[in-house]
Structures are given as structure tokens and as C-alpha cells.
Image (tube, rainbow, N blue to C red):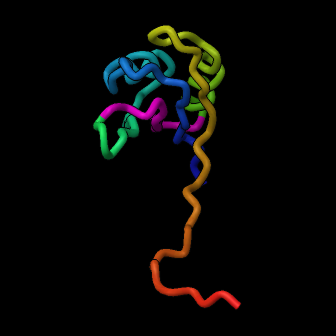
Amino acid sequence: MSQNKLYVGNLSWNSTEDDVNDAFSAFGNVTSVNLIMDRETGRPRGFGFVEMSSDSEAQAAIEGLDGRDLDGRNLKVNLAKPRESHGGGGGRRDRW
């Protein structure tokens, strides 16, 4: 399994995808940046995901950016965990 997708937390609400891309590109080729937005307000939720082109670039970004300042906030950067399946559906569940 590839380990080049990173979780980026503690982002400032003022940080843009371009700001995050610029910070991470110092450590290698950034293939995607996805900041998570609140559905109701449209404002950033303070975290997102960055994908680097290789595992070694992702590791360099973790070492170089975890705990570092971006827009007045100390970033939390680590490997993204796989998304958990919640079973889907929404059907009725009998409770005994």
C-alpha cells in the first residue's frame, strides 16, 4: 500500500489550497490538495489531505512540516489513515 497521502490538521481557516500546496511543494511533487469544507457554511473545517508523488517525499514533508507554522497555526502532519467503512445503508435495525 502506498503511503504518500497525508493528513494535515490544525490549518487556519484563512489557509487556501494554494498556501498548502506551496508549503508541501518544498518537499517534493504535490499531486493533490483537498481541504475539507463545512457543508452548511462553506468555510474550511481546519484540516485536509495532501498527496505527494512518492513515499519518500511524503516522509520528508512530515518531517519538515509537522509542528511548523502556517498562517499562524502549528500544523499537524502525518500519514492519512484509510477511510473506514460504516456499512452503508440506513435501513431499519431491530434492537432486541
Q: Residue at x 71, y 91 (%)?
A: 96
Q: Quadrant of residue 10?
A: top right
Q: Nearer the viewer, residue 59 or 42?
A: 42
| Residue 49, percent from left and from top | 47, 38
Q: Is residue 50 magenta?
A: yes
| Residue 66, percent from left and from top | 63, 21
Name above or below for residue 31 compared with residue 91. above
Q: Quadrant of residue 19?
A: top left
Magenta region's main secondary structure?
A: strand
Q: Nearer the viewer, residue 96 or 57?
A: 96
Residues drawn in magenta: 43-55
Name above or below for residue 23 compared with residue 85. above
Q: Residue at x 37, y 32 (%)?
A: 44
Q: Residue at x 32, y 46 (%)?
A: 39
Q: Nearer the viewer, residue 21 or 42?
A: 42
| Residue 74, percent from left and from top | 58, 15
Left or right of residue 39, residue 77 in this image: right
Q: Residue at x 53, y 14 (%)?
A: 73
Picture quarter with the N terminus: bottom right
| Residue 42, percent from left and from top | 28, 37
> Can residue 73 be seen here?
yes
Q: Is residue 88 magenta?
A: no
> Can residue 31 be seen here?
no
Q: Residue furthest front?
A: 96
Name above or below for residue 73 compared with residue 17. above
Name above or below for residue 50 compared with residue 70. below
